[in-house]
Amino acid sequence: MSLRSAAEVVDLFNRAFVDRTPELLVDIIDEDCVMESTQLAPTGARIEGRAACLAWWQMLIADRTTQFTPQEVVVTGDQASILWRYRFGAEPGDWVEGVNLLRVHSGRIVEAYGYSKTTGEVPAATDSGTLTLIAGFTAKPGQEQRLRDELTAMIEPSLAEAGCLAYQPYSDPHRPDRMIIVEEWVDSAALDYHFTLAHFEHLAVVLDEILAEPFTLRRMTDLPV
């Protein structure tokens, strides 16, 4: 199978956000991918590693209160620029333009840097109150107990983080290979910070070894009252 061109990779990346199909990202993110988000100032949150980058982008895609729309895409060699419009609310003025700069190597994204046209704080996709997520995992045959042990080991260091409000793994009684974590964070910055810590980086490496498929990440919202 031939490697995807940079243009094909960028097209899949954009379609993942436009069509809300995060599965398109699974095969186009490099193991050593590095990304920097548009916030927080002055340099943005730095996310390292395939699992962390994938989880961060999945979180954005899962938030249906926001929408990224590509405006112009330019691919030159292994680099690409994506001019986008980000809508973060229902009011006419609730949008901002920005650009992502990507670098592709061997058919996968290795670097992604985001920049936004704003002098103030634009609400991130996860800034409407606290952030509640459900992460889903499916273990390879024979790796069920190791997955359970690794997720359990994440509880104490995660809850010790100032921005973590809840972090609890659960297993499916009918499918021992399936587990989830229900987690709550004070805001998106707290989750960004979580992705940079040693205990998450360790888990990301282990998950690549023991999962039957990439883990999923879904954002939950309150029911209307």
Image (tube, rainbow, N blue to C red):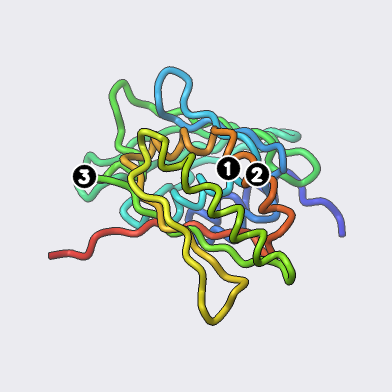
- The reply to whether the C-beta atoms of the residues labelled 1 and 2 are less than 8 Å apart is yes
- Residue 33 circle label: none
Q: What residue is shown at x 43% (from left), y 40% (from top)?
A: 191
- Residue 92 circle label: 3
Q: What residue is shown at x 55% (from left), y 49% (from top)?
A: 153
Q: Residue 173 at x, y = what percent?
A: 51, 78
Q: Residue 31 at x, y = what percent?
A: 72, 42
- Nearer the N terminus, badge 3 or badge 1? 1
**How many neighbours does mark 1 have within 10 angstroms: few (below 14), some (14-19), or many (20 or more)?**
many
Determine whether the residue tagged by mark 2 lies in a helix, strand or loop: helix
Q: Residue 26 at x, y = what percent?
A: 65, 55
Q: Amino acid at mark 2?
A: Arg
- Residue 50 circle label: 2
Q: Toward the viewer: 62 or 51?
A: 51
Looking at the image, the residue that sits furthest to the top is 42
Q: Residue 118 at x, y = what percent?
A: 33, 25
Determine whether the residue tagged by mark 1 lies in a helix, strand or loop: helix
Work out how far the residue at label 3 is from the one at label 1, CA to CA, in angstroms: 31 Å
Looking at the image, the residue that sits furthest to the left is 225
Tag 1 residue: 53
Question: Does 131 sit above or below residue 35?
Answer: below
Q: Quadrant of the N terminus?
A: bottom right
Q: Is residue 19 visible?
A: no
